[in-house]
Amino acid sequence: MSWGIGEWGISPWGGALPTAAGDNPPIIVLRSPAANAVDVLENATISISFADFDLDLDTGTTLIEIDGVPVFTGLGGFAAGYVGSTSFSVGRFTVQFMKLGGWGFDTLVTVRAFIEDLTGKCADDTWSWRTRINPICYSGLNPLAVELFVQSPMTRFLDLEPVRQVFLNNALQAQTQAIANSENKAARVLYQEAFATEIHTITNSFGIRNEPALRSVVCERQRVAEIDVQLQRHIKRIKAGVESLFLLGALPKEYKAEFSDYLDSTTYNYRVSLVANVLILARLTETAS
């Protein structure tokens, strides 16, 4: 039977805790990954917590199966090919484990968890989740027109030219000269960051959204936080470039407050996304004039 909804579940008593000692069956209070989860990492750790308000769990009866095969028992521990740990505290028993070598890509994993208490009452639940599809690294071939635009130097928005170079030079983890087609891959990172937050709605009127490009994976991409560190050293130039966009009429003035909010955001991914949009808009404006 199922005692919960989602990862944490809900009490079968509707939130009211029972009071009759010894009458309560054990329940499962944590299922991670959650039932019906998708895009789960292929090396995800499974976490399951059992609880009993009567504090009488019989941990020796624990059984956890993956796709119908036992991988953990309370008396025998973990099966070959699995590693993990257990913990017990105040009527709660938690089992965490992972599969050596991972679950594989695009794999449906079905978990069964079972436990009894000392009176023979049990919790028994089965749920499934699926790992992510194998990401195919972007080769850097066939760049979008907008990606080629951002690889060209600025000719009018000169405050943004050093910013463009900094973004592209820090978009990838390794030294750019060691990566095949690094220029196109760096431009793909910039393009994807532009669509990473809601601010991208401003660029929609240019018709540059490309779903396959947004779903592609740049395996050498740098962490967004690291890109932000480099960009913040040029914040005055960024703000001057934003001001130029509005002064030249490239953007309606009603967007100005939103741009400022993103630039001054305490969240780095908003700042990086804003800069990516500014660079794309500036280049598109130059090529259109």
Image (cartoon, rainbow, N blue to C red):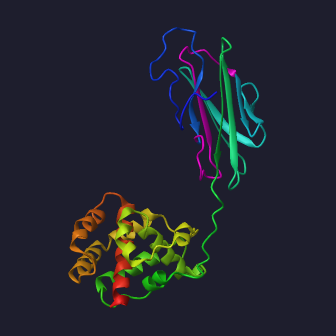
Quadrant in the rendering for residue 88 = top right
131 vs 286, left or right, is right
| Depth check, front residue: 203 or 39 | 203
45 vs 254, left or right, is right
Quadrant in the rendering for residue 163 = bottom left
Question: Can you give x and y, in whole percent of width and height, for residue 9 in the image?
Answer: 53, 32
250 vs 100, left or right, is left
Quadrant in the rendering for residue 166 = bottom left
Q: Main secondary structure of the magenta part?
A: loop
Whether residue 229 is visible to the viewer of this picture, yes or no, is no
Quadrant that contains the N terminus: top right
Q: Is residue 44 magenta?
A: yes
Residue at x-position 68% and y-position 27%: 114
Question: Can you give x and y, in whole percent of width and height, for residue 202 in the image?
Answer: 34, 71
Residue at x-position 30% and y-position 89%: 156
Q: With respect to residue 149, does 221 lie above or below?
A: above
Question: Can you give x and y, in whole percent of width and height, for residue 254 in the image?
Answer: 22, 69
Residue at x-position 51% and y-position 8%: 20
Q: With respect to residue 63, does 131 lie above or below?
A: below
| Depth check, front residue: 106 or 226 | 106
Question: Can you give x and y, in whole percent of width and height, for residue 136 in the image?
Answer: 64, 68
Residue at x-position 41% and y-position 81%: 165
Q: With respect to residue 226, does 238 lie above or below?
A: below
Highlighted range, magenta: 34-60
Quadrant that contains the C terminus: bottom left
